[in-house]
Amino acid sequence: MPGRIMIVDDEPALLTMLRYNLERHDFEVTEATTGEQALELAIRSPPDAILLDWMLPRMSGLDVCRELRRLPNTSHTPVIMLTARVAEADRVQGLSVGADDFVAKPFSIAELIARLRALLRRSARQAPKEVLSYRDLVLDIAARKVTRAGVVYHLGPTEFRLLAFLMHDPGRAFSRADILKSVWGPSLYVEERTVDVHIRLLRRTLNAQGGANLIRTVRTIGYALDGD
């Protein structure tokens, strides 16, 4: 059952210790030392679970967890918070932004791995749908495949993420800022008009066979997946 684990911590000694022990148990490990770096890596290649330190520089673990829950690729990724804060109010705060479990520092490696394995088992049973559909449009996340009325369309990575984001909540209007943060990530500086460019590319591809336009422009706000 071992999977891909991302460790997010700014303490080199702890990173080294966690990597060593996780790899001993056959996990594949990636590391990030800041919240911004963690979000960039998660967008590029979502892990199976994340070990996330609460006290990170600039962007706290709470803020990172909140953003992970907004990203389509990581909205259901298990997150274990590593923290010295064990008060009930702290746990409530962590749960409110989407953390799945807490491990108090200093911790037992055996307990951490046991909790991680349990979380991965539960996540596998509750895995979100990998195939999204709206009208005649179907997006297969695992196969990275998009079809409309049975015709396969080839999308670039950004257009694929953009379409997946919209298809997770059809009918809802998203601002350009929301789309930028969720599809490109909050740590990347990208102008809002970039969204317009990629929406045009996405529409051009999806409407190539003459189908109705399924992406609605919401005046003064942004866009929605809404054929009406």
Image: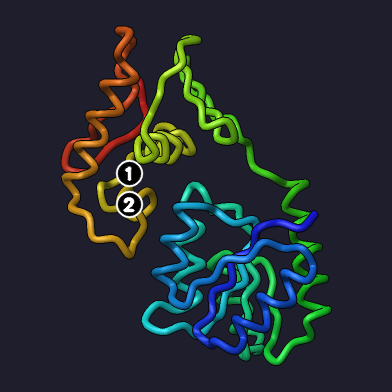
Q: Position of residue 145 (x, y in %)?
A: 51, 26
Q: Which residue is mark 2?
A: 178
Question: In this rendering, would 114 be left or right of 150?
Answer: right
Q: Residue at x 44, y 72 (%)?
A: 35
Q: Position of residue 152 (x, y in %)?
A: 46, 16
In the displayed structure, would residue 28 be above or below residue 131? Answer: below
Q: How is the image coloured?
A: rainbow
Q: Residue at x 20, y 36 (%)?
A: 197
3D distance between C-alphas at marks 2 and 1: 6 Å
Give me the disc on residue 174.
1
Q: Residue at x 53, y 88 (%)?
A: 11
Amino acid carrying mark 1 in the image = Phe
Counting other residues with Cα less than 10 Å from the Cα at mark 1, is it few (<14), some (14-19), or many (20 or more)?
some
Position of the C terminus, as image quadrant, is top left
Question: In this rendering, would 79 be left or right of 160?
Answer: right
Position of the N terminus, as image quadrant, is bottom right
Q: Could you tell me which secondary element the residue under label 1 belongs to?
A: strand
Q: Position of residue 16 (x, y in %)?
A: 62, 82
Question: In the picture, residue 225 is in which quadrant?
Answer: top left
Question: In this rendering, would 158 be left or right of 164?
Answer: left
Counting other residues with Cα less than 10 Å from the Cα at mark 2, is it few (<14), some (14-19), or many (20 or more)?
some
Q: Residue at x 78, y 81 (%)?
A: 109
Q: Nearer the viewer, residue 196 or 13?
A: 13
Q: Could you tell me which secondary element the residue under label 2 belongs to?
A: helix
Give me the disc on residue 93.
none
- Tally the marks: 2
Q: Position of residue 92 (x, y in %)?
A: 61, 76
Question: In the picture, residue 218 is in which quadrant?
Answer: top left
In the displayed structure, would residue 195 be above or below residue 95? Answer: above
* Mark 2 in CB contact with mark 1 (< 8 angstroms): yes
Amino acid carrying mark 2 in the image = Asp
